[in-house]
C-alpha cells in the first residue's frame, strides 16, 4: 500500500520542526524523522491503529506517536496522511476537520 502525504500534513511537520528547532535543530530533525518512520510502518499494517473518535468513519484512523496524533485515511490503493496534530489540541474545535478537507 502506498503512503501519500497531504499538503496540510507536510505543513504540520514543518511547523513541528520549526517550533522544536527554536530550542534544538538536532532534536527537531530527529523527531520529524521518527514521525516519518512511524508513518512508513503503516504500509504493512494500515488498520493497526484506532479509528478517530471525532470522525465517526472507520477508514479515518490515527497513529499515536509521542505527543502527536497522526491522522490518516485508509483507501483501497493508498494511505493518505491528513494531519499531524499535538494531542493536547482539541480536535473537536478545529474547523474544518482534517478528513473534510481532502
Image (cartoon, helix red, strand yellow):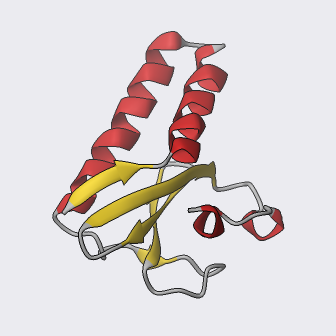
Residue 68 is at least partly visible in this image? no
- Residue at 62% of width from left, 51% of height from top? 85
Residue 99 horizontal side relative to residue 73, left or right? right
Instruction: Indicate whether 77 appears above or below 64.
Output: below
Point out residue 27 in the picture as x, y percentages from the top left corner: 47, 20
Q: As drawn, which residue projects farthest toward the right?
A: 93
- Residue at 64% of width from left, 56% of height from top? 87
Question: Within the image, what quadrant is residue 26 found in?
Answer: top left
Between 11 and 84, the residue placed more toward the observer is: 11
Report the quarter where the C terminus lies: bottom right
Point out residue 65 in the picture as x, y percentages from the top left corner: 45, 52
Q: How many marks?
A: 0
Residue 34 is at least partly visible in this image? yes
- Residue at 29% of width from left, 54% of height from top? 3
Instruction: Indicate whether 5 appears above or below 18.
Output: below
Question: Within the image, what quadrant is residue 18 found in?
Answer: top right
Report the quarter where the N terminus lies: bottom left
Amino acid at each position: 500500500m502506498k503512503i501519500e502525504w497531504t499538503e496540510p500534513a507536510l505543513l504540520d511537520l514543518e511547523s513541528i520542526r520549526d517550533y522544536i528547532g527554536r530550542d534544538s535543530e538536532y532534536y527537531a530533525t530527529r523527531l520529524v524523522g521518527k514521525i516519518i518512520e512511524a508513518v512508513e510502518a503503516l504500509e504493512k499494517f494500515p488498520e493497526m491503529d484506532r479509528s478517530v473518535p471525532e470522525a465517526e468513519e472507520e477508514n479515518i484512523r490515527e497513529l499515536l506517536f509521542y505527543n502527536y496524533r497522526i491522522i490518516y485515511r485508509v483507501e483501497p490503493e493508498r494511505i493518505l496522511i491528513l494531519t499531524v496534530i499535538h494531542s493536547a489540541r482539541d480536535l473537536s474545535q478545529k474547523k474544518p476537520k482534517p478528513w473534510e478537507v481532502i
